[in-house]
Amino acid sequence: PDLTLPTLALHFSLNVTSFLFQIPTQRIKSGGYRIWPEYRLHSFVFLCRSLVYMLLVWYRDQQQKYLYHNNNNNNNKHQDNDFFHQLCHFALVLASCAAADVASHSQATDKSPTIRGLD
């Protein structure tokens, strides 16, 4: 059986459950690396980017299987789909970067430095 969609749902639900826990509003600079709100939001944004990317690849594979089984091997349509998927991937990267910026700005009052900013 194809376990792609259940596996993606499991990854999504694991990250979403992190929002159930109370965490410090600011980054704790001593005592190791701990999660803080901005980091948790960034983690969610980039998880979504990865999951959507995997969904796009899964969808493209499903399309190719459908075309193969229906003996509809039209190379032009295949090339158009590849261009469309590449365009979607490019838009996905830009959208996730914009979403990460929005996540950072939403934490403006409790903004904490990144891991690099601690040194």
Image (tube, helix red, strand yellow):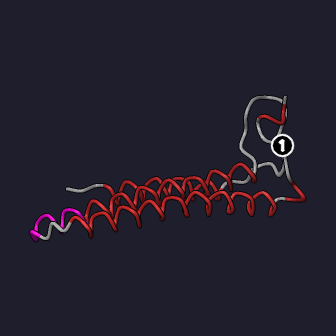
70 relative position to 42: left or right: left
Going 32% across and 55% down the picture, which residue do you hit? 4
Is 21 on the left-hand or right-hand side of 65? right
Provide the secondary structure element on which disc 1 rests: loop
User: What amino acid type is highlighted by mark number 1?
Assistant: Pro
What residue is disc 1 on?
113
- Would you identify the image quadrant in which residue 92 lies? bottom right
Q: How many marks?
A: 1
Residue in the picture at 67% in, 53% down: 42
Residue drawn 83% across the image and 38% down it: 28
Q: Residue at x 19, y 62 (%)?
A: 65
Where is residue 22? Give x, y as percent. 73, 54
Between residue 60 and residue 77, name the one nearer to us.
Answer: 77
Q: Residue furthest right?
A: 109
Residue 9 located within the stretch drawn in magenta:
no
Residue range (magenta): 63-71
Q: Nearer the viewer, residue 64 or 54?
A: 64
At label 1, counting other C-alpha atoms closer than 10 Å, the crowd grade (few under 14, some 14-19, many 20 or more) is: some
Q: Main secondary structure of the magenta part?
A: helix
Residue 68 falls within the magenta-colored stretch: yes
| Left or right, residue 40 beside residue 112 | left
For the C terminus, the image quarter is top right
Q: Is residue 110 left or right of residue 49?
A: right
The answer to which image quadrant residue 69 occupies is: bottom left
Quarter of the picture containing the N terminus is bottom left
